[in-house]
Amino acid sequence: MKKEKDEGMTRRDFIKSMGFTFFFTTLIAGTAVLGIKGRDNFSLEKCVNDYICRGCGLVSECGLPQALSYKKATGKEGG
Ligand code: SF4
């Protein structure tokens, strides 16, 4: 008679699950880091609102010439 294995998680299953957990955690963390870095570079190097700074959500952190002119003209130059 065949003995069934349903004694819970085996060592092999545990190592597999740890591998998957490590892999997906690294993947998510890497994606988050690249997203944050990409956002910083993107907002500083490329306009996302057709250079219409009025009402643009990035105007306070944007360093493009149009944004700087807009902030100077409107007196919204912060620190
Ligand atoms: S603040 Fe102005 S220049 Fe900067 S992303 Fe927005 S619209 Fe473009």
Image (cartoon, rainbow, N blue to C red):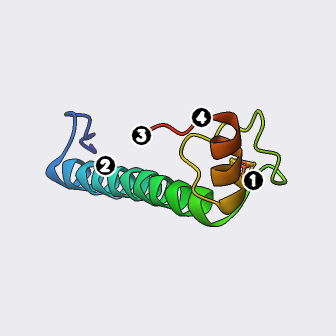
* Residue at 22% in and 34% down: 8
N-term mark: 3 or 1: 1
Question: What whole-number distance in Å separates the C-alpha atoms at marks 3 and 4?
Answer: 10 Å
**Residue furthest toward the left?**
11
Q: Indicate the amino acid at tag 1.
A: Val
Residue 33 on image: x %, y %: 40, 56
Q: Indicate the amino acid at tag 4.
A: Lys
* Residue at 26% in and 34% down: 6
Mark 4 Cβ inside 8 Å of ligand 1: no
Q: Nearer the viewer, mark 3 or mark 2?
A: 3
Give the quarter of the figure containing the C terminus: top left
User: Quarter of the image holding residue 58?
Assistant: top right
Residue 28 on image: x %, y %: 42, 51
Callout 4: 10 Å neighbours few (<14), some, many (20+)? Answer: few
Question: What whole-number distance in Å separates the C-alpha atoms at marks 3 and 2?
Answer: 42 Å
Of 12 and 45, nearer the camera is: 45
Callout 3: 10 Å neighbours few (<14), some, many (20+)? Answer: few
Residue holding disc 2 = 21
N-term mark: 1 or 2: 2
Residue holding disc 1 = 48
Residue 9 on image: x %, y %: 21, 39
Mark 2 Cβ inside 8 Å of ligand 1: no
N-term mark: 3 or 2: 2
Residue holding disc 3 = 79
Q: Indicate the amino acid at tag 3.
A: Gly
65 with respect to 38 (left or right): right
